[in-house]
Amino acid sequence: MIYFALLILVIISYLFYFVGKKRALNLKFNGNIKLSSQPDYFGYYVVLMALIPALLMWFGLLLFKGNFQEMFVMSPILFPDISTWSDGKLGLILNKLNNLSVIVNLPLDDLTNGEKSILNMASENELTAAKKLANFDKIYGWSNLTLFIIFPIILGFLATRSISGKLNAQPIVEKIITYIIKGSSYIAILITIGIFLSLVFEAINFFRYVNPVDFFFSTGWNPNRAFVVDASEGFDKDDLENAFGFIPLLTGTLLIATVAMIVAIPLGLMSAIYLAEYASKRVRDIAKPIIEILAGIPTVVYGFFAALSLAPFIKDVGESVGLPVSAESALAAGLAMGVMIIPFVSSLSDDVIKAVPQSLRDGSYALGATRSETIKKVILPAALAGIMGSFLLAVSRAIGETMIVVMAASLRANLTFNPLEPATTITTQIVTSLIGDVEFDNPKTLVAFALGLTLFLMTLLLNILAITIVKKYREKYE
Amino acid sequence: MNSLNKRLSAEKRFQAYGLFAVALSMFFVLILMWKIFSTGSGAFVRTTIEANVFFNPDFIQVNQNSLEKELYRASYVALADEVVRQNHPKLNEEQFIKVREMYTRKFDYQLRDYLLDNPDKIGQSIIMKITASSDLDQIVKGNYPRDVPEAQRKINDYQLSVLDKLTSEGKVSSVFNFWFFTKGDSRDPESAGIWGAVMGSLYALIICFSFAFPIGLLASVYLEEFVKPGKVTDIIEVNINNLAAVPSIVFGLLGLGMLIGVIGLPYQVPLVGGLVLGFMTLPTIIIASRASLRSVPPSIREGALAVGATKMQTVFHHVIPLSLPGTLTGTIIGMAQALGETAPLLMIGMVAFVMEIPGGPLDPATGLPSQIYLWSESAERGFLEKTSAGIMLLLLFLIIMNTAAVVIRRRLEVKW
Amino acid sequence: MVEQVNSFAIKTKNVSVHYGNKMAIDDVTINFTKNDVTSLIGPSGCGKSTFLRCLNRMNDVIESCKVQGEFLLNGVTDIYGDSIQVETLREKIGMVFQKPNPFPKSIFENVAYGPKIHGLASTQSELNDIVMESLNRAGLYEEVKDRMDDIATGLSGGQQQRLCIARAIAIRPEIILMDEPCSALDPIATARIEELINELKEKYTIIIVTHSMSQASRISQRTAFFHLGKLIEHGDTSKIFTKPDKEQTNDYITGRFG
């Protein structure tokens, strides 16, 4: 229905554009009135006048639908103890009523057995509330439709009537459109602020349970300790002391990222050098897109591959030479991540290498240096800053990568630097703590936001550093 | 001379390293593809067992005159059991349970769906290809070894003997697995389909596009055409570049904390998933769109201004239409990335077990990549090939989108 | 006296233009007579194009450009006045650029665009008439009448430039500014445009910037010589090219510098 209404809205605004323009042209040609704006603008004027209030109100209704619903349905007459309910319970009941409201007005014959039993289990008050809710939904639907069709038509009509020689539509229209496009460009900033606020807000909640010093410096990670306690009864400080220690997650993340970089940097950099300096055009045209494919493969695929093939393979190889290898070794996850990052490193390095001016190369060749000598002694040193920048970007990418480690790394924290042992990462723990019941009053859930905040700041720092380095480098050769 | 030889062999070594790096990277692509195709191809066929089905009205309590509604709601479980008993006569109760296990648990649905299409068959006998259970399917496909001790097998010796008998009678066959493309998720691998996840991803992408495309386009228009370069643009520019490098899981946390936690949008729905993916795609679109706007030559703007077009008309009538192919290319590439993103979907709950195919962006759903993740975490062997097949489908969509992007760039982009 | 005022299409007084701190035009005063072709000549970088773009405020787009002085359209309307809408002004003063810049749309759309946005036609057939008449006047109609829906960028350079002229006259301007309109064209196309300019002066006042002195002498009635941002000399073309008052002008037209 909403799609239908949107479609009608589009049609209405299209029509209003012509109505407004037509009226302006009529005034000009038949009424001999000099217009103060181009006729186009009268069309836009009518459309904007008709649409904007309707869209704003629709958005408001949508935003407050839940509140209206509650006001309408959740009266203390039907639910006397409503004031004592927690938000969670309120949500559950509302959900139940929503399900009920769909079936409560249907004839009994049309119901499945499951639906019948839902009806039978509901109390009398709940049924009354569900009926009210069904009514509300009906009214809501109709008011939406009114808003979408009748309201814009009236406003558009009024706006059309207001067109005269005196009305200067252009500045009004331009002002509104400027606001809209200006607003659009601020949305990127809003998103960043939104990320920051939502992370900080919930992280602060987390730090109400857990001392930040404990979090950042303790080495024990056992979030399940917080699980055994009922949240409403509060937490035993001792239980939480060694439950949320960030250190093993950090070491695990760095361990896996290091393995990944050990794979990705030489392979990525050497591929970039080979393709840029040695390969014939034909080889380049074939090899480059194939390597780029690695970048296009979703990370869930790498994770699947790492868990299914790579980890058992590494375990078998390790055991055949007498090394004890875990089935969830950091090595497997790191290798898969390294492969994923190869094209990232190679395309960034490629840009950097190409930015080195030809004159430097020519100078080196003129001295009789071979290609590899030129690359090693001239190009790479010249491109060093840029390449370091791209490595930093790759590291930031590795730290933030989620699916590969969720699927192939361990869930258990392990303070180790041995890649053959299992290790867990920040992102893995964020996912683990949020899968299943999400309760915002439990440190086991909230820790995800504290971890997220740390991760966000870490990657942000790396990115800013990398972008600054690369920018400086670019300026050097421009 | 000696030192020159040394230098030349160093040169050769260096070149060989480079070639090795390129070859190894390409080898990784091949091995990934090979692994996925070899494990996934099985999912496109399913094993069936031919059986004689008598639609006995007594077992389903319907008759020739029953309405479609009644046919739909009747229970076919007893009929399914009866079909098994009739096709395998003289079974004791223990044997019956074992034989029944060889057929899919969704046997009754298959009967129902058939009858809904052919209501005139009530009271008649037909030959039907009944889907086998996943464990049997895996044995037939050779994914489970037969020559291991019985205790390690999901299919015991008795079931194997029945299978062999059925095979020798020519009753076991493989058919194309339409279910995989038409059904939602299921606890039983043989009846699990990807369509629910595809629709979930589709709704999420529609939301993602409706959010990110107009806003990304307008934002880049503002930055390129309307505002003087200065502090504000610098801040927005740095912001966009950083946003492009924020880990996807952090966007997921934004969705959970802000959209679900503060604004109160529902959990598990494509609306939230799409918005989060839209946030992620926005920087990509803005960057592509700005580059595209910049490539429209100033002479076009001058031409429009000179005939008395306003700045706004110049931009909306001429500059934007000319930059659109570039913007669209960037958008499609961004959306292809979004389609493959899994972590944000995990954060906002689009990883639950959802059987129903979502009918809109407000229905609980999984996405294509999160469905792949769900299946990959599943212990049953039958889901392994589903996982790989899901990946194949996902890759297919990505290939289509990227090809579309290339085609748009080649065909529509105006060269100056 | 009254007639004298009205015989000028544009009057300018003490015009100075700065790009940032750099001076591009230094205290230029010049009046353009109606229905004449006036050529602005001078060595590259002398400010003739800058001056031309001041006349229809195309310099407004350039951030650092500051224009001072008096500009009067038809002797009364202040071109840079607060009450003037720049779009309406450009409706009266059309412009053709150095490189042909048709919109990558159909030939019809290129010419129709101006009349459309200014609302010059009340019906589609009126619009068709305007387009046809403009193309006709630009001497292009016969060549393109069978392919009005073809994309304009497919035309030859000379045709494109005539299309741009048609686009400019479609909004019924009084004055047409031309910024080296033939510099990107071959001699045949150039001859065609010159012919056209000669026809157009019956209806329009034309101000043309050209780097070719022979072109200036062929097509214009009045010529203004610019050098280093200053107006050196302005007068009848025949006089400027035969016995100029200033030595600098003489040096330039005889090829001693520039």
Image (cartoon, rainbow, N blue to C red):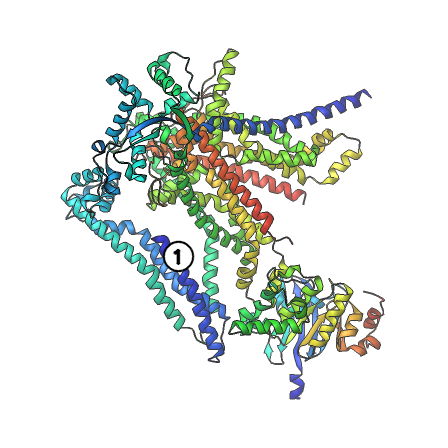
To which quarter of the image does residue C105 belong? bottom right
Residue topped by disc 1: A7
> Viewed as shown, does residue A275 lie left or right of A327?
right
> Viewed as shown, does residue A322 lie left or right of B273?
right
Question: Secondary structure under badge 1?
Answer: helix
The vertical placement of B9 against C203, above or below, is above
Q: Is residue B380 visible?
A: no
> Viewed as shown, does residue B76 lie left or right of A398?
left
Q: Is residue C223 visible?
A: yes
Q: Nearer the viewer, residue C19 or A437?
A: A437
* x and y, in percent, of residue C87 in the image: 56, 70
Q: Nearer the viewer, residue A305 or B16?
A: A305
The vertical placement of B171 against C187, above or below, is above
To which quarter of the image does residue C154 belong? bottom right
* x and y, in percent, of residue C28 in the image: 70, 73
To which quarter of the image does residue B126 belong? top left
Q: Chain of mark 1?
A: A
Position of the C terminus of chain B by quadrant:
bottom right
The vertical placement of B282 against A305, above or below, is below
> Viewed as shown, does residue C103 lie left or right of B156?
right
* x and y, in percent, of residue B100 in the image: 29, 23
| Residue that appears at 57% across and 26% down | A263
Please name the amino acid that badge 1 sits on.
Answer: Leu
CA neighbours of label 1 inside 10 A, class few (<14), some (14 to 19), many (20+): few
Position of the N terminus of chain B by quadrant:
top right
* x and y, in percent, of residue B9 in the image: 74, 22
